[in-house]
Image (cartoon, helix red, strand yellow):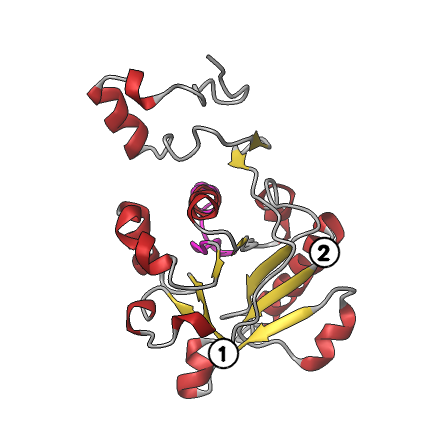
Amino acid sequence: MMKDKHSGIDTTQNAVLLSKKDQEKQSFFRWDILENAEIVGSHHHPKLKAITEIPNVKRLVTLNNAPYEKNPEECGLCFYTKDPVIERIWNNRNKYIKLIQRFPLVIGLDYSILCNMYYPQQDYNCWRNYVMTYWLQQIHPTVVPNAGYGGIETLPWTLDGMPTDSWLAVTSQGCFSDYVLKHAFLNGLHELVRQKHPRGIIVYGLFPEEWKDKFPVPIIVYKSYAQDKWGGS
């Protein structure tokens, strides 16, 4: 029986051997998802799988719009939407398996890690992003990790568990309304490239063409739902 060296949680225990009460506890805290995960860093993120090739899709569709998409084979599924919407899959993940598998490309979860959030909220949301992205990678072959971060002070730990030499994804939504947020986004992106050496980056939202020259990797930009519908950011 093996335990994660940081948490002391048994990561290999077969659920069949657990009592019903213990199984309920594992499910509630999402320990069942992490049963076979490699846990890294002081914040106990599961290490995510590198995605070295991605399908060519025309656009990204958010979770709340995904059930109504008529051509899912042309789209990627993403979670760049409000946290209460993301909460639906956190609370009832198995309900969404068939929907997820309709899309050839999936981007990992994006619970908010805002600059003005309390640190414990940032920490918990980041952990949930990793846990659910790890789960998505168990049920779908092409789940690109989403790199969520807040201010520069979050970068030492929010990237723990992010793979190297992989396609990664970010969103620029909300970053162009404020000078500080725009530069926090750019600084974080530079640090992501420096640390993880991605094969390429998927951006959901605004990303000026001239910015692409600032980065030594391919960048694919998809318009956000707000841009398509209202011309916003």
Q: Which mark is residue 193?
A: 2
Q: Position of residue 230 (x, y in %)?
A: 41, 87
Local crowd size for mark 1, using a 10 Å CA cut-off: few (<14), some (14–19), many (≥20): some
Q: Amino acid at mark 1?
A: Ser
Q: Which residues are magenta?
A: 109-127
Label 2: state its secondary structure.
helix
Look at the image and tell me whether residue 32 can be seen: yes
Label 1: state its secondary structure.
loop
Query: Looking at this view, is 57 or 176 the one in front?
Result: 57
Residue 114 in magenta stretch:
yes
Say which residue appears at 26% left-offset and 51% top-offset.
Answer: 95
Vertical order, 28 against 165 (above or below): above
Residue 152 in magenta stretch:
no
Vertical order, 59 against 142 (above or below): below
Say which residue appears at 47% left-offset and 82% top-offset.
Answer: 227
Q: How many marks?
A: 2
Where is mark 1, residue-wise? 233
